[in-house]
Amino acid sequence: MARPNQPLPTWADPDVPVGSLDPQGLSRRGLLRSAGLFGATFAGAGLLAPTPAEAHPGHGEDPDLAYLVGDHHVHSVYSHDAKYTFSQLARAASRYGLDWMVLTEHSNFGHARAGGAAAEHREILQARRDNRRTLIFQGLEWYVPGAEHCTVFSPPGRHEVELLTRFEEAYDGKLLGFTAGAPGHPDTPRNEAHAVKALQWLDQQRRSGYVDDVLVLANHPLRLGIDSPHEMRAWRDAAPGIMIGMEGAPGAQAAALPGWGGPAGRRGEYQNAPSEHSWPGYPQEAYRTYGGFDWATATVGGLWDAMLAEGRLFSVTSNSDVHRVAYDTWKNGDWAPGQNFDNTGRLPDPVDTDEPQPGSDFWPGQFSRTHVGVTRYGYGHVMAGLRAGRVWVDHGHLVDGIDVRVDREHGTGRGVTLGGRLRVRRGERIVLTVTVTTASRPNQRGDVPRLAHLDVIRGAVRGPVADRDAWRAPDTRVVHTADVSGRTGRYTLRVPLGRAEESSYLRLRGSDGRRNGPGLLGAAVDPHGPVTHEPGNGDPWLDTWLYTNPVFVDVAR
């Protein structure tokens, strides 16, 4: 089986002189060195085979990690509503410091008829050869039957094209007419059942060895309100080994830039209202973003917490969903006579106009980042880190790094980190240790970001719920806030959490402190959470947040 010859990125390569690195590279190398992974240890052997600790995360395992930055939701000329070539996207990813990204084209009739996955693959192979700094995955943005969209992707190797082609033909809601807005009267039970079958089929391809791996994440879950809580639980339960989470924050973060996005613009393009296809149990507030994050993630005690309170990992990510970048000067090229997307499956290459063109996105890595903890460099290690839940996300390059550990108060090790599970006896004291590496360089706005506060959010684990549409976690709240304004460099916080009386989970949230207020479920639950912005007035650079995945604490009975 052919494997891409993928060298280390420059910041991870000990043969690259320090003097040749930019500030971002220097910072990344420092984080790698602090994790004890600099040099040959991080290079490892094999791009696809994860280490045992990555492949089988369990109680108490805490490998040294380096965090690779990526984006799992990127569109090119193979999507009917985008405009960039793979080479443009790969160059941007490298420019903004991405280590990995997933090219996720919309399924579409033209895309399917023209053999989209195979046609894309030829260009992806070239992009991998030309852009050796970034791990480039091929994926698909799946129209989920009866619901919104998901990212589906696998690593380079056997059947990566065939997997996407077969999946699109058999399970894509748009091609089948199984989407929530399809003409006529959608058969909701049929649609929801077909989505579950789709995930089970994908999981079987992984288990059988047809492909080395596959992962699925829900995209912009509350944008239209059509991803119900019971559907999201059904997806997770149907294939927990591959259906690992959702976008905690959508793309289109430039949609409300003042003077650019229009008077109704909202971050994430979350400017909808409930429709006949929406799940009726969502409040009107669910159709907005808060600090740029989806309501399901931003609401302490909300839908994400309700899923975590069942005691099962469900990750959040943040990415660009890039189609058209704000202030970019490129426009779609002109069609040749008789050609269109339906008969080619590919847009003409874009042309530069020297004038800003409409757009509400950022380039991959320019604003939104997903950080995945790995022990070695390669495609399989990124996927293993995502599956293990070693994930944190930020906007605006808010911090360079964050390391989270939960342990017994007098533990002999370092405890467990993001996505992990710490097993303790009832009554044992536990402690949270957080090491922050502050931003060391200006972001793309020209500011050096500053973290103002970190919140510790804790929730009780109650097990599976009887009501599969429940979206509240009544025992989750902010239990500690650390004021870190003015702190720079690298520092460590130690937060005692008392005695463990019942199983629980912990997650962190931080912000630049410029826009916050009582959370949607009240100040007693969340005293200073993210708030939505006025239409047309949501500068994302002035309202940046970070979120971490949870750490679970399992109390033995």
Image (tube, rainbow, N blue to C red):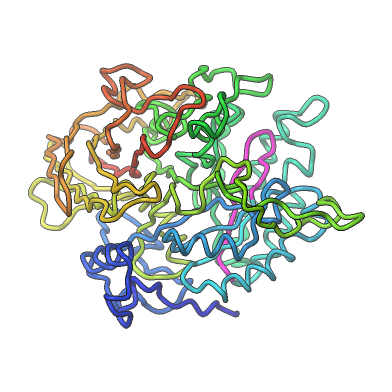
Q: Residue at x 56, y 63 (%)?
A: 137
Position of 508 compared to 157: left or right? left
> Residue most toward the left?
410
Q: Is residue 406 above or below residue 542?
A: below
Magenta segment boundaries in residue numbering: 141-156
Position of 414 compared to 24: left or right? left
Q: Is residue 152 magenta?
A: yes
Q: Is residue 41 visible?
A: yes
Q: How far across and how far down the image is residue 242, in percent?
A: 52, 52
Q: How far across and how far down the image is residue 186, in percent?
A: 76, 28
Position of 183 compared to 233: left or right? right
Q: Is residue 505 visible?
A: no
Q: How far across and how far down the image is residue 332, in percent?
A: 72, 52
Q: Is residue 208 above or below residue 503?
A: below
Quadrant of the image containing the C terminus = top left
Quadrant of the image containing the N terminus = bottom right
> Residue most toward the front?
354
Q: Residue at x 34, y 30 (%)?
A: 462
Q: How many marks?
A: 0
> Residue most toward the bottom?
15
Position of 55 compared to 154: left or right? left
Q: Residue at x 39, y 56 (%)?
A: 372
**Nearest to the observer: residue 514 or residue 501:** 514
Q: How far across and how far down the image is residue 408, in percent?
A: 14, 47
Q: Residue at x 35, y 44 (%)?
A: 549
Q: Quadrant of residue 278?
A: top right
